[in-house]
Amino acid sequence: MKTYDEVAKVTYEGPDSREPFAFKYYNPDEMLGGKPMREHLRFALSWWHTLCADGVDMFGGSTMDKAFGKADPMEKFKTKADFGFELMDKLQIDYYCFHDVDIAPEGATWRESLDNFQQMVDYLAKLQTQYGKRLLWNTANNFGDKKFMAGAATSCSADVYAIAAAKVKAGLDAAKKLGGQGYVFWGGREGYETLLNTDMKLELDNLAHFMHMAVDYKREIGFDGDFYIEPKPKEPTKHQYDFDAATCMNFLRTYGLEKEFKLNIEANHATLAGHTFQHEIRTAAVNGAFGSIDANQGDLFLGWDTDQFPTNVYDTTLGMYEILKAGGFTKGGLNFDAKTRRMSNTFEDILLSYIAGMDTFALGLRKALALIEDGRIDQFVENRYRSYRSGIGAKIVAGQTSLKELADYALTVPDFTVESGRQEYLESVVNNILFR
Ligand code: XLS
Ligand code: CA
Ligand code: CA
């Protein structure tokens, strides 16, 4: 196998290739369903997992060196950035995503941290131009530091609330400068462990006010990216306020924010909430809030956020099917919020993991388009609801009936039959498309 340095560019070689550092399914400029694959998929590299995570877990230290041999903090982060852009170039990835603390060292004071951050934003701007890459979204890490132990915009401390706001303001300034396509709000520690010490109503009101201020500031500086909330049900806190897509929609509507935010759906967070990835995408879509995707997969036997590279074609097919049905991405994309396993600890593994994830979504896209073209699923669903297209059903859909009219109607129905849902047949159709 080649070494990391020996791989100049990962290119498409097709499904019969045995070359580990080649795409078997992702052919960036191939036209499918009216646009190139790269535009359907809009892949992004996650700074935190790719350039920062070094294998540390609860039981052991790092297994991978991501200091790039640099001791000076700014030098280290600049080298990370150089590596990140080179990696995107090798992998033909057009976008990237970061938290503030992923791109710059934190200083002894907030002023110092802000200064480091702004210097690094300028550095990233130069690399963007040099490599022709774009920022999909950025965010603030308002959960890692000790001061955020009780949350950020839901902290019991007003001073912590203020520093959280300062970090989001700096993030929005950076997004504007870098021409970001979006900005993510993931709750972090916005939730609670016990009601015995929690004023839930105040925390939710404060969180909503925080979001409104962010919307105001976005307008003020003319940032035209999309705002996303990223649902997650648990971890780090026991009860997260952004539990799942439906809970987020309820929050947004309660506080009059639904026109300002879309959702960033993460596959692993969906399964932690007891939902499928597809369910969360569909829920976002039917609420007019489908935005972006954090592409990864969890382990259904483990109850935490394992952030694995996606390799399950069944899930990516049904996920891409939902994304296509939702009209595809506009400003969002597929961000690999995924890290190599602790034992996959070489730079070659980073390439191999991205290739695996990108190919799995590329194959999912191909299969989802084939499912749509095949038409059996769509036709089945269309036919299943045909009773709503005429007679009393059409009146129900048009909102033109009443309980009284339906009660009278029910008296005239000789028998209440429902046709088979044919689940097993439909699952066999999916298999037929997947394995042909
Ligand atoms: C953590 C989240 C986080 C967000 C961005 O579980 O997935 O990484 O995507 O803050
Ligand atoms: Ca995520
Ligand atoms: Ca995650």
Image (spheres, rainbow, N blue to C red):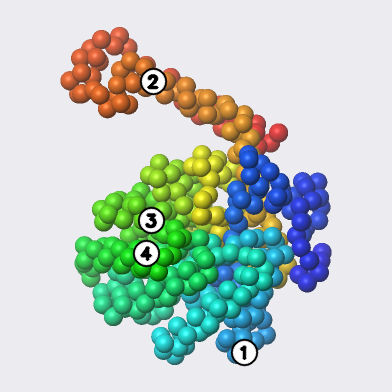
User: What's under tag 3, amino acid-wise?
Assistant: Phe
Looking at the image, which residue is at 27% across and 54% down? 256
* Helix, strand or loop for disc 1: loop
Q: What percent of the width, then of the height, locates residue 405?
A: 20, 18
The residue singled out by tag 4 in the image is 219
Name the residue nearer the viewer: 207 or 413. Answer: 207
Name the residue nearer the viewer: 140 or 342. Answer: 140
* Helix, strand or loop for disc 2: loop
Circles 4 and 1 in contact, beta carbons < 8 Å:
no
Q: What percent of the width, then of the height, locates residue 192?
A: 30, 66
The residue singled out by tag 1 in the image is 71
The residue singled out by tag 2 in the image is 389
Foreground disc of the pair 4, 1: 4
Foreground disc of the pair 3, 1: 3
Q: Is residue 327 above or below residue 433?
A: below
Q: What percent of the width, then of the height, locates residue 87?
A: 68, 68
Foreground disc of the pair 2, 1: 2
User: What's under tag 2, amino acid-wise?
Assistant: Arg
Farthest residue in the left direction?
Answer: 404
Circles 2 and 4 in contact, beta carbons < 8 Å:
no
State which tag comes first along the sequence, 4 or 3: 4
State which tag comes first along the sequence, 4 or 1: 1
Q: Is residue 232 visible?
A: no
Looking at the image, which residue is at 68% across and 55% down? 356
User: What's under tag 4, amino acid-wise?
Assistant: Arg
The residue singled out by tag 3 in the image is 261
Foreground disc of the pair 2, 4: 4
* Helix, strand or loop for disc 4: helix
User: What's under tag 1, amino acid-wise?
Assistant: Ala
State which tag comes first along the sequence, 2 or 4: 4
Looking at the image, which residue is at 82% across and 64% down? 1
